[in-house]
Image (spheres, grey):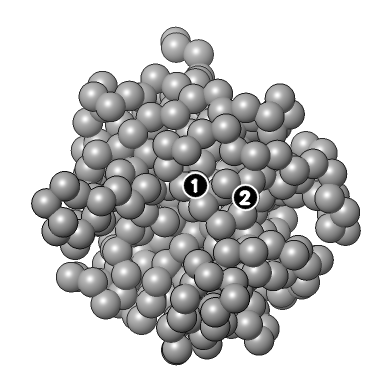
């Protein structure tokens, strides 16, 4: 009998030649808006999303930027994609949820302003009763967050994951370090043990013909203890709407040493709306 490999070991076996074979497609028959994070919690699937009511202007110019208006959602579905709960999250200008993860009790989700260097609140949602609790606030736009279930530390990345953070459960900053990689911007993540986090994300690269951007996807293993990126690999597969698989929501599972990638790269207003897609890594 083969010994079971960890998610980190399975991710480390993937490369640009990996073929991602679609094994399941679950349409979501409700207004999903712009999905951000994905987590599997027993019989439930949690999907965070932002509904933009008024687009922010001059997002990258702090002297001219406007916050816009919107609503943050945490959708809870069953494994067939049926909507069970739509939880409104955030307050005021902090309406943009990020990537999420489940620590065994709670789903952690940051909700921030829709602009770099904004403010964010860190929330947890009880996976049994769906109670939302604000844990602390951060003076930065946090794009994803999770709990190190082994130590209680909270990890996160800011806008584009250009910087990484570690906090205690009360929000005291324990560590902050610059991302040494500019390969992709991590959008969603999950804890993998021993201070390591597996992230998925995207880089929008301009095309030479001026016909818009090319979406480069990928995933990485980030070591928060030793402040380094242990592994990165591109993903060059796309949805029916033309989005790279790791555009936003991202989760990994394994079975019999097979690695499965779960994603929802398309928005509710894209072709076919949002679908939960499950891919098997084939080497």
x then y, percent, for residue 189: 54, 46
Dot 2 corresponds to which residue?
157
Residue 143, by quadrant, is: bottom right
As displayed, is residue 10 above or below residue 21?
above
x then y, percent, for residue 67: 56, 82
* Residue 270 badge: none
x then y, percent, for residue 208: 16, 47
The answer to whether residue 223 is left or right of residue 268 is right
* Residue count near mark 2 (Cα–Cα under 10 Å), binned few <14, some 14–19, many ≥20: many
Dot 1 corresponds to which residue?
186
Residue for point 24% across, 39% down: 236
Nearer-the-camera pick, 5 or 71: 71
- Residues at marks 1 and 2 touching, judged by CB atoms closer than 8 Å: yes
Residue 279, by quadrant, is: top left
* Residue count near mark 1 (Cα–Cα under 10 Å), binned few <14, some 14–19, many ≥20: many
Residue for point 63% across, 59% down: 142
Residue found at the far front of this picture: 63
Residue for point 29% across, 48% down: 205
- Report the label total: 2
Mark 2 or mark 1, which is nearer the start of the sequence? 2
Secondary structure, mark 2, is: strand
Residue 21, by quadrant, is: top left
Does residue 266 appear anywhere in the picture?
yes
The answer to whether residue 184 is left or right of residue 223 is left
Residue for point 65% across, 69% down: 118
Residue found at the far left of this picture: 209
Does residue 84 appear anywhere in the picture?
no
């Amino acid at each position: 009998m083969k010994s079971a490999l960890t998610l980190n070991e399975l991710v480390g076996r993937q490369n640009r030649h990996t073929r991602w074979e679609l094994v399941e497609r679950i349409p979501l028959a409700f207004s999903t808006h712009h999905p951000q994070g994905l987590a599997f919690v027993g019989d439930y699937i949690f999907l965070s999303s932002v509904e933009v009511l008024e687009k922010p202007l001059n997002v990258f110019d702090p002297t001219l930027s406007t916050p816009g208006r919107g609503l943050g959602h945490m959708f809870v579905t069953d494994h067939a994609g049926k909507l069970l709960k739509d939880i409104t999250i955030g307050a005021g200008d902090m309406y943009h949820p990020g990537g999420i993860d489940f620590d065994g009790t709670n789903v952690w989700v940051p909700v921030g302003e829709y602009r770099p260097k904004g403010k964010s609140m860190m929330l947890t949602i009880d996976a049994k009763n769906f109670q939302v609790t604000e844990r602390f606030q951060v003076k930065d736009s946090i794009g994803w967050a999770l709990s190190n279930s082994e130590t209680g530390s909270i990890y996160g990345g800011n806008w584009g994951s250009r910087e990484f953070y570690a906090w205690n459960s009360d929000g005291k900053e324990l560590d902050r370090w610059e991302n040494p990689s500019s390969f992709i911007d991590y959008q969603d993540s999950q804890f993998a043990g021993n201070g390591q986090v597996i992230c998925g994300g995207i880089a929008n690269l301009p095309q030479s013909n001026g016909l818009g951007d090319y979406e480069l996807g990928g995933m990485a293993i980030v070591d928060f203890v030793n402040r380094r990126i242990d592994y990165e690999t591109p993903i060059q597969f796309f949805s029916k709407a033309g989005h790279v698989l790791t555009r936003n929501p991202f989760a990994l599972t394994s079975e019999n040493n097979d690695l499965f990638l779960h994603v929802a790269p398309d928005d509710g207003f894209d072709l076919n709306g949002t679908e939960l897609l499950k891919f098997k890594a084939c080497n």
